Amino acid sequence: MSASVISGKVLAAQVKQEAAQRVKELRAQGVTPCLAVIMVGDNPASTAYVKGKAKDCEECGIESRVIHLPQQTTQEELLDIVDELARDAAVHGLLVQLPLPAQIDDQAVINAIPPEKDVDGFTAENVGRMVIGEDCYLPCTPAGVMAMIHSTGISVAGKQAVVVGRSNIVGKPAALLLLREHATVTICHSKTKNLAELCRSADILVAAVGRKGVITGDMVKPGAVVIDVGINRGDDGKLCGDVDYAAASAVAGAITPVPGGVGLMTRAMLMVNTVKAAVRCLPKA
Ligand code: GUN
């Protein structure tokens, strides 16, 4: 039996269509949602991501501004620009593309974004709100991961979930969202001793390491839902995930492909968050 494929293409198109409908309604009420993206330097992956975000905005009817700064930008200069956009009432969502050059303290810059414009959900305030279950912007990749899990129709409550990777952007928040839905969650990382065994216990396996082939077919429990967050280049130059897709899809119940999986959902969730940010600016009834 081979796993059913959870298509990021199909799901992201649905999410974006709903966002586009909300944008239409907002525009009719006099609010044009606007996302500002700041990028520092010329990291090729970041360039591609930022282009993708602008394209999604256009498709959804969201205005986008891309502020591209040179690699040698200082933290002070960047903070000035963040501050300017923070005060600009026409900008609803504001994000700074990561990674930033070494001279800049990422978290200091992120925390300068007003929480109500933090559509990445990366500020300490939004992270804290997520931890205690208050209304907040959910970080886009983990929110996309959850939407893909939900699309399989399984109930998360009571399941064994294993998240491989503990980054602030993906692993930690994905584990929290699974916990919030009552999964029993294990977070694995580079110091984990029995990775294969733990992965094999997972009804839901989320791979967010950033290294190709870390999850082999024998690490997947038969019938498991496997979500591959990795975006890596194979030896052939092609995009691939953290999971050995051919081997894992022979064992899993459902699996996300790379490309065409989580990446597209991350982008779609950013549109959802930007709409949410613009809704806040509707005139009060
Ligand atoms: N770099 C890689 N992923 C992301 C993301 O989701 N947001 C930002 N701001 N930077 C990233």
Image (cartoon, rainbow, N blue to C red):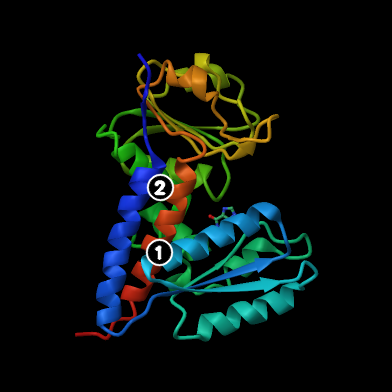
Determine the secondary structure under disc 1. helix
Q: Amino acid at mark 2?
A: Gly
Classify 92 as above or below 227: below
Residue 152: % across, % down: 29, 34
Q: Is residue 148 left or right of residue 267?
A: left
Residue at 51% x, 25% y is 245
| Nearest the eye: 194 or 281 | 281
Res 146 → quadrant? top left
Quarter of image, ligand 1? bottom right
Tell me if 262 is positioned left or right of 2 in this view: right
The disc, 2 or 1, on the residue closer to the chain's N-terminal end is 1
Res. 28 visible in picture: yes
Q: Which residue does the image show at 66% across and 81% down from the upper left? A: 80
Instruction: Bin the neighbour count of mark 2 within 10 Å (Cα to Cα): few under 14, some 14-19, many 20 and up.
Output: many
Q: Is mark 1 within 8 Å of ligand 1?
A: no
Comparing labels 2 and 1, the label whose residue is closer to the camera? 1
Q: Position of residue 181 (x, y in %)?
A: 31, 41
Residue 257 in percent (x, y) is at 46, 33
Q: Which of the pair 69/167 is nearer the observer? A: 69
Residue lying farthest to the left in this orientation: 285
Q: Amino acid at mark 1?
A: Glu
The N terminus is located in which quarter? Answer: top left
Task: Identify the mark at residue 59; answer none if there is no mark.
Answer: 1
Would you name the residue on which mark 2 appears? 144
Residue at image coords 53%, 80%: 86
Residue at horizontal 59 percent and vertical 81 percent from the top: 83
Q: Which residue is nearer to you in this view: 62 or 210?
A: 62
Residue 200, relative to residue 255: is it above or below?
above
Distance between mark 2 and mark 1 Cα atoms: 19 Å
Q: Are marks 2 and 1 in contact (CB under 8 Å)?
A: no
Is the residue marked by circle 1 packed among few (<14), some (14-19), or many (20+) residues within 10 Å? Answer: some
